[in-house]
Amino acid sequence: MTRLLHLDASPRPGRAGTHEHGSHTRRLTHHFVSRWRTLEPDTEVVYRDLGATPPQLTSVEWIEAAFTPAEQQSVSMRAVLAESDALVDEVERADILVLGVPMYNFGPPAAFKAWIDNIVRVGRTVDFDPQQASHPFMPLAQYVPLLADHERHAVLLSSRGGYDFDPGRTLAAFNHLEPSARTALQFIGIGGFHDIAIEHQEEGGEALAASTKSALARIDRLVERLHRELATPRLTQPA
């Protein structure tokens, strides 16, 4: 059984195409999860609405607690890290992270950045080892990704007001959303990264409709491909 972690970071509560003023990214994540469930009805899905309930920001108390060895943490330190521990636990249990993240001012909304800052934790999701020679997903020596114990994938589903933000396009250098998310997640050991975005949101009309249709079709293809890839090892394991 595949385990999905479904996160929405948009503050818009509804889904575009279904609710007035709904979120395009919520529409994409809902489509991904629904399509996956048609192929694997018993899929375990954990849902967290980052847009409605953003994680706590890092504070001096959080930093002090996070960099204190677990056996030396006080009760108050453990309380400060309780939410972060819960967020990390969700990522650890997931096979696929389905991330709905709109582009705001060329990067992610604050709620998603707060989530990243809570799950990139020394001793929980990454370690530092002077003897470590290489990183399995990034050219960073001495860092040990603790979530590389088995194959995990992140699917980042985004929406953009403008267009041409993809690699090789005119505004690629202004896109600080997908590249930063890919770096942070691969740093902790999530090796598979896939991104699909709706563009032309500000323009609307036919351009937005065509981009939305293309994004939904690409999600369908990605779901089918990932399901085949993740199902194959299960089918070939000895009884």
Image: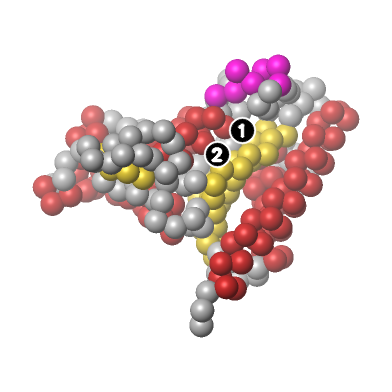
- The answer to whether residue 123 is left or right of residue 9 is left
**Image quadrant where residue 16 sits:** top right
**Residue type of the residue flagged with mark 2:** Ala
- Residue drawn at point x = 55 percent, y = 24 percent: 176
- Residue drawn at point x = 65 percent, y = 70 percent: 41
Residue denoted by label 2: 9
Asked whether disc 1 touches disc 2, contact meaning CB atoms under 8 Å apart, the reply is: yes
Q: Please determine whether, in this image, residue 4 is positioned above or below residue 178.
A: below
Residue denoted by label 1: 102
Per the picture, the main secondary structure of the magenta-coloured stretch is: loop
Q: Position of residue 123 (x, y in %)?
A: 26, 46
**Residue type of the residue flagged with mark 1:** Pro
Q: Nearer the viewer, residue 34 or 125?
A: 125
Q: Position of residue 26 (x, y in %)?
A: 65, 44
Q: Nearer the viewer, residue 197 or 146?
A: 146
- The answer to whether residue 52 is left or right of residue 55 is right
- Residue drawn at point x = 70 percent, y = 17 percent: 170
Q: Position of residue 181 (x, y in %)?
A: 50, 35
**Image quadrant where residue 23 sits:** top right
Highlighted magenta segment, given as a residue range: 169-176
- Residue drawn at point x = 71 percent, y = 57 percent: 224
Say what secondary structure mark 2 lies in: loop
Q: Position of residue 91 (x, y in %)?
A: 44, 52
Q: Callout 2: 10 Å neighbours few (<14), some, many (20+)?
A: many
- The answer to whether residue 3 is left or right of residue 81 is right
**Image quadrant where residue 19 sits:** top right
Residue 76 visible (yes or no): no
Q: Please determine whether, in this image, residue 41 is positioned above or below residue 112.
A: below
